[in-house]
Amino acid sequence: MIEIGGQIAAQTAKKRADCLSMTGYAQARTERDGRVVRVSVKSVNHRFLDLKMRLPEALEMYEPRLRQIVRGRIHRGHLDVHVSIDAAKDQTVQVNRELAHAYLKAAEDLRLDSKAAAVLDMAGLLRLPGVIGGTAVAAPETEEAQEKLGAVLEECLQEALKKLDEMRRAEAKHLVEEMRSRLERISLHAEEVRNLMSALRPAFARRLEARLSELLRGAAIDPARLAQEAAVLAERSDISEELERLHSHVLQFEKLLDGAGEIGKRLDFLLQEMNREANTILSKTPGVEKEGLAVTGLALEIKSEIEKLREQVQNLE
């Protein structure tokens, strides 16, 4: 018999999931040696790890080691990592005068060539790429300074990833609670189906007798033959194996939710198997009086819960 409710609730009470969602955002800030380092990390769901990293030109030498840190902590999802560095004090606005004059000269030349009346205004000039910016921080020149800055960048990135994990873990906990509720409903529906199956054998016999009566047009029907044909029809429509496999998949799903790490792909595979069992139940249970219609309705409810589970699993690492 399929165990419902109690076993799932007991497992839930004993152990909560420690898996991770693939959606989250976090940022960290570190101020040291006259520099302010900021790291922001944004993550959304993705089948594989898709890492996009943006760093200032002065920090490009550190990108490989920063990527390695991210890959060691996160295994699935689309990640945007943004790293910036500024001077800690005396923030000033610098204007690249040479570049600004070059833009002005180019604009004037175009104006003369085209005889256009428009003139480049100062606000538009300042918005052009490279004309204005904050205090630039140059790349360290010595190996010691480079290693020191690299350690600060790694520390800031680790802090951002730690905060990201906290957010991802909190969202995963909410997702897992919803998924457990859906698994319990699947088990309840499956148990109802099992209870209805015992009432379907007489229904199969009545349907078979009606068909034979229509074909024989009033001729006598051998009761033994009728019972034999009804048994064959019932055997072909038996869904006990499908119900047992569905029960097994639900328990495996629960066990994975109790664990940690990368479980999204394995859960998705289990849902494919659960959906296959639900489809088989539907195919083996045609509308046979009210019991058969009830089984069909319950199987459709099971499929609906499986689809909702699939949507939620897509957001788990």
Image (cartoon, grey):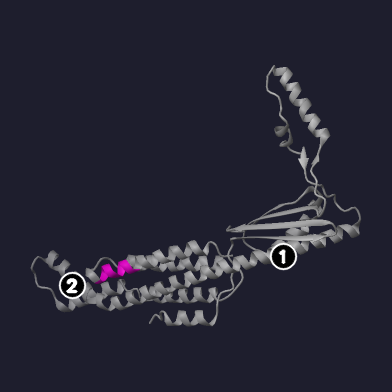
Location of residue 139 in the rendering, given as x and y in whole percent from the top left corner: 85, 51
Residue 29 at what x, y percent from top left?
A: 74, 60
Range of magenta residues: 291-298
Q: Position of residue 301 (x, y in %)?
A: 36, 66
Circle 1 SS class: helix
**Front position in the image: 208 or 200:** 200
N-terminal of the two: label 2 or label 1?
Answer: 1
Residue at mark 1 = 159
Residue displayed at 52% across by 69% down:
174
Q: Are marks 2 and 1 in contact (CB under 8 Å)?
A: no
Residue 129 vertical placement versus 12 (above, below): above
Residue 106 within the magenta-colored segment of the rendering:
no
Give the left or right position of residue 252, taking residue 295 as reference: right
Residue furthest left in the image: 218
Q: Could you say which is closer to the camera, residue 153 or residue 210? A: 153
Front position among marks 2 and 1: 1
Q: Is residue 105 left or right of residue 12?
A: right
> Magenta part mainly helix, strand or loop?
helix
Q: Is residue 213 above or below residue 62?
A: below
Q: Amino acid at mark 1?
A: Glu
Left or right of residue 276: residue 69 = right
Which residue position holds label 2?
206
**What amino acid is at disc 2?**
Arg
